[in-house]
Image (cartoon, rainbow, N blue to C red):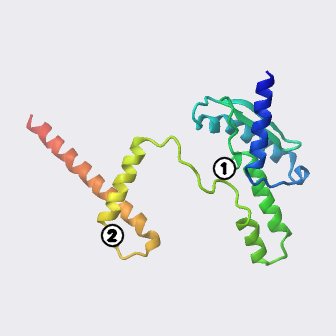
Amino acid sequence: MLSRLLLVLASAVVMVSSQYSATINPDSVSLSLRQTWCFNQKHSCPLICLQLNGSTGASVNDCDPNTLAYSCICNNGITPNASEYSETMAYYICTEAGNQCVSNCAQGDSSCQSDCRVDHPCGAQHPIRVNVTTTSSAVAAASATASNTNTANPLGTNAATGGAVRMSSDLGHVYGLCLLVGAFIAGFAVLL
């Protein structure tokens, strides 16, 4: 029991020291909004833990809407970096701190407002993709092949929309192929 308590305390220290943590006065946000944040935090914690190797859920999952204090420790002893995920208390606090910073800027001071967002970004800055299936890898490989074989923009649209047009064009080819195969099968069925 003592070793588990020490593990929890050590995880909490690592979590606090390893991430930028914005702070806000809890009373600056309505209690109903803080309750929603805690609700989302408590529902996100087990889902985040499932993405970590060797974890099947959360062993500690607490949130206090009055103080905005929260704890998420997976059953494998790992404390995930909650600031890297949306719908977590760390994300909500960071976002609200940014909103309050912008509100404190002088009217029309866009450089101050920009600094509030750029200097303290919220959410995953370099997310790690987990639970990627073979299907999505095959789709990515097919997309890369299609992009490499169709480098010209056939409709003369700008680069910002060229990818969407190219994707639609590729889907048209797939749809046409499906119709052709369907017609072939229907024709073959009529012959029998």
Position above or below: 92 against 40 = below
Looking at the rendered structure, the number of numbered marks drawn on it comes to 2
In the rendered structure, the answer to whether residue 151 lies left or right of residue 130 reads left
Q: Earlier in the sequence, mark 1 or mark 2?
A: 1
Of the pair 99 and 75, the residue shown nearer to us: 75
Residue tagged by mark 2? 151
Residue at screen point 69% across, 45% down: 81
Quarter holding residue 78: top right
Q: Which mark is residue 40?
A: none
Amino acid at circle 1:
Glu
Residue at screen point 40% across, 42% down: 134
Residue 61: percent from left, percent from top:
75, 33
Residue found farthest to the left: 191
Residue at screen point 86% across, 52% down: 29
Position above or below: 161 against 34 = below
Position above or below: 188 against 106 = above
Q: CA distance from mark 1 to mark 2?
A: 35 Å
Position of the N terminus, as image quadrant, is: top right
Q: Residues within 10 Å of mark 2 (few under 14, many from 20)?
A: few
Amino acid at circle 2:
Thr
Of the pair 103 and 171, the residue shown nearer to us: 103
Position of the C terminus, as image quadrant, is: top left
Query: The residue tagged with tag 2: helix, strand or loop?
Result: loop
Quarter holding residue 115: bottom right
Residue 52: percent from left, percent from top:
59, 37
Residue tagged by mark 1? 84
Nearer to us: label 1 or label 2: 1
Residue 2: percent from left, percent from top:
81, 23
